[in-house]
Amino acid sequence: MEKKALVKFVLLHFLFVFSLLCLFDVFTFKVYAEEEDSFEKSNIVEANTINEVLESNSKYIDIQLFQESVQLDLPKNTASFWFSIPEGTVIGGENYLNLDMKVSNTLINDRSSITLAVNGTTLETKWIHEITDNNQSWWKVIIPSEVMKIGELNEMSITTAQRSIEGDCADIDNPSNWVRFDPDSYFRIGIVQFGTPYLGNLYSFFYNSFNDKYRIQNEYVLPQNPDKAVLQGMLKISSSIGAFNRNKNLISNRVSFREASDPSLKNKLFIGTVDNFTNSSILLLPDSLSSEEGFLSVQNGNALISGRDEIGLDKAINFFSNISYLEQINEAQLKVSSVVSENSAIDINSNETGYYSFSDFEYDDVNLAGAFHQKATFIFKQPGGIESGDDSYIKLRYHHSEALLSDNSLITVYLNNVPAGSEKLSNSNADGGSLKVKIPEEIRESETIEVRVEVYNYLGKIDCSKDFSDTAWTVIEKQSEIYLEPSDTGVYPTLTSFPYFGITAENNSITVGMPTDYDADTLNIMNILSTKIGQVNGVTSDFIVCPESDGLTEDAKKGNMIFFGSFNDLWLPDEVSVRLGILPLDDGFTIKENLSVANETLSEKLVFQVIRSPWDFNKKIYVLMYDPSIKTYVAEFLSDTNKLNRLSDQISIVNQNGVATNYLFGDNLSAQDNKVPLTWERIKYIIEKSVGLPIWLLFLALLLIILNIFVLFKVLKKKGRFEKAAKDMGNTNEEINDSYLENDITKSSISDSYVEGNIKENSIKEENSEDDFER
């Protein structure tokens, strides 16, 4: 019994102590979690969460560093993150980086380190093994407020020196030598006070601040029954915002009527004549406006684009959409009476020769600096949607450091990820070399040609912990050539890079065909489409809104087009519908042959299609139709660039999981449908290519030939006149000679008569003399 009691006492004592320890551990973990909550974060705080944090007097924001994992696998690497702090913002409290880092277990402890710098100021360096635990850990670094710049772009750079194998440069191309930064890494900034926006910094304040690195977010507030002028203005403004934010791949937009309704969206854009918003308490309103006068203002996160009447509203929309004008205004409000010029398009107009330089496509010299592998990518859209001819080529011009060893240094050109040509980097081409590669037919058949240039800058045995960017370099010159030989065959448009139109300065108008009856969700789809148009094409566009009730005007037919609607309310002109592969009907669909599609497979799907405009060979028409039951998903899909990148070919059917099934349809067209219409430029090119002379010289020669023929004709005509004149002159001379002869005869007869008279006179005189003598 005593033994049992003793065992029982020991067990109870053990359980009591264990319970106390567990309670203590739980309490300790709770305190740790409250004090160091940042170490447990796995998701970046979204905009609405940030607003709540600021309102709870714990003023800080967390900025996501990377949208996807970043892997570093060279002996020396640098990953950079850029962020902007709006002008007028006051930073305070604790600012720090929290980096989620995972590393290879092959790293050598005393050869692998990591360094953080902000705007060139080094803040901390550590051995990687001191940070990691079981090959993964969080690295927290305090960032002083004084190293950050307000109202300017800031750079945070993370540099690693990492080795897995001993020996000179043994880790080059070593897949086991890696360090990875995951996307849940974040940068916390303490905020004492936010800055105040004004018109000049509105775009930057709205779209370049803190956590807006990857997302565009706006709420568009329109009058209750917006007319076409308001809708077209909204689309132009949203395309301008898209063009300003080309690298952001998420869009959070919403359209509301009369007043803002979504507090999670911090940027509010009120569009309409001023009489629609006179009762608003959150807007900065004008005291008075004259006829045809526009008005712009911003107060906190609320921007007003307005006017006294439709003409004034149009002036305000154009001014707001052209950032080069807006950024000159240092006030929070502006009355607009001027009609400003349009933004110029950046797309390349096709020319008759087909010769372009890289600079024509907005590329500058590119320096591929650093030892070993370096690369750069160039994207070229075939101008005018015309497939280039067989003689098309790319001639890369470059120069490089004379320190490179020619036996191992190389330059290689890839076309659409396929190797196309290589050559050595030697002393003979250090001051200037060229590499010419022909563009194969299979690449010329696509709208986009991707040129990737890779160089191997080899210096020999070096310290691979340094990049030697000042010694090992190759420069790709902006005067590199790309010859896209004009042909008579068009590139059939595809859904790749949707919605790319190839907008030119001559015609940047886009026609939008929409259902006659629409709600806020319909307008939101249209709004997101126009934002994507701005992002993809990089230019602010004008829009012509065409509901079914209005039909297409002649001006609307001149531009690129996009039609959208559900299977039930989509409207299309007959010239467009007959060219589609899938067409919704009242009782199903018309589906062209050779498409593995049935009525049943289109349930709860989005359908994208693209065709060439029947009114202009060089223009495109996109058609977006969807099952009405998934209308809300349409906006979600269009808002994500990564999902849109899944579209290709001419028809794409998308389910609610974002999976796209693509179909070729352009191959069904006849060769004649794909022939480029004969235009003056085309005729001129054909003539010049045939004779090998410029058209102006041919015209000059033709003019000279015509002039010579005219002169010859005149000479021949005059020759006949001369011959006739000579003949007439000959007759006249004969007559004159005859007349002269007759005169001579007459003169002779007169002379004879005169002589006879003289003789008679002399004989008389002699007779008289004889008589006188006799007397």
Image (tube, rainbow, N blue to C red):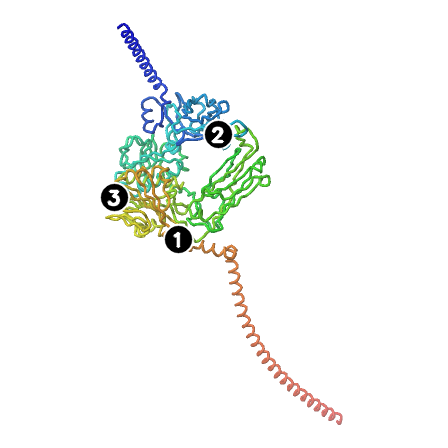
The numbered mark at residue 517 is: 3
Query: Is disc 2 surrounded by few (<14), some (14 to 19) or many (20+) residues within 10 Å?
Result: some
* Image quadrant in which the C terminus is located: bottom right
For label 1, the SS is helix
- Check the image and name the residue furthest to the top: 2
Q: CA distance from mark 3 to mark 2?
A: 56 Å
Label 3 secondary element: loop
Instruction: Give the image quarter of residue 316.
Output: top left
Between disc 3 and disc 1, whose residue precedes? 3
In front of the other: label 3 or label 1? 1
Q: Nearer the viewer, mark 3 or mark 2?
A: 2
Decide if residue 561 is in sight here.
no
Q: Which-is-in-front pick, marks 2 and 1? A: 2
Residue 759 image offset from top left, x and y in percent:
69, 89
Amino acid type of the residue tagged 3 in the rendering: Asp
Label 3: how many residues lie within 10 Å, few (<14), some (14-19) or many (20+)?
few
Label 3, label 1: how many angstroms apart (C-alpha)? Answer: 36 Å
Instruction: Give above or below for 550 relative to 193.
Output: below
Question: Can you give x and y, in whole percent of width and height, for residue 585 in the image?
Answer: 26, 49
Q: Earlier in the sequence, mark 3 or mark 2?
A: 2
Where, by quadrant of the figure, is residue 712 drawn? bottom right
Say which residue label 1 marks.
Answer: 674
Drawn side of residue 110 relative to residue 287, left or right:
right
Residue 247 on image: x %, y %: 40, 36
- Relative depth, front residue between 703 and 139: 139
> Is residue 708 placed above or below 60 in the rendered structure?
below
Q: CA distance from mark 2 to mark 1?
A: 49 Å
Please give the label number shown on residue 77: 2
- The residue carrying pointer 1 sits among few (fewer than 14), some (14 to 19) or many (20 or more) residues within 10 Å by Cα, namely some
Foreground pick, 133 / 530 = 133
